[in-house]
Image (tube, rainbow, N blue to C red):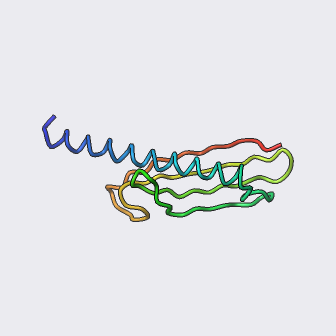
Amino acid sequence: MTIYGQFLLSAEIQSSARAFLAADEGAEKMLYRARNLNECDDDQSICRVSSESASSGGCYSATASRTAGAPSIMTIKVIGEYPSCGAESPRIIKRAFELSYTIP
């Protein structure tokens, strides 16, 4: 592998880690909003966060949705991006999480 190729690979790993950390931060914040602040408390409600800056230098967008009935299921979907948020570029790295839990 050439030195140029090694530089590209190391830059992609760094960008991937920052996108991963942005998604992780978004998941933690959405869990806090849903569980502690009860912002998504109504049945069939949807909470959204779009293009929030993360401490890793990237950003994230997230949705939390809750099914109706008892027990209901809360599903949180988060996408972390680095380096540009919301822009369409072949160099943007995206990492995502989907979390689900049951609410009695």
Judged left or right of residue 2, residue 84 is right
Considering every residue shown, the one lying at the far right of the view is 70
Q: Residue 68 lies in what quarter of the image?
A: bottom right
The picture places residue 44, in percent across and down from the top left corner, at: 77, 58
Judged left or right of residue 21, residue 68 is right
Say if 51 sits above or below 22 in the image: below
The picture places residue 32, in percent across and down from the top left corner, at: 65, 50
Could you tell me which residue is drawn at 30 percent across and 45 percent down?
A: 12
Say if 48 sits above or below 23 in the image: below
- Where the C terminus falls, by quadrant? top right
Could you tell me which residue is drawn at 86 percent across and 47 percent down?
A: 70
- Where the N terminus falls, by quadrant? top left
The picture places residue 61, in percent across and down from the top left corner, at: 53, 58
Q: Which of 52 and 79 is in front in this view?
A: 52
Could you tell me which residue is drawn at 80 percent across and 57 percent down?
A: 43
The picture places residue 39, in percent across and down from the top left corner, at: 72, 59
Q: Nearer the viewer, residue 20 or 35?
A: 35
Question: So how many labels did they put on this image?
Answer: 0
Q: Which of 36 and 49 is in front in this view?
A: 36
Judged left or right of residue 36, residue 99 is left
Say if 72 sits above or below 89 in the image: above
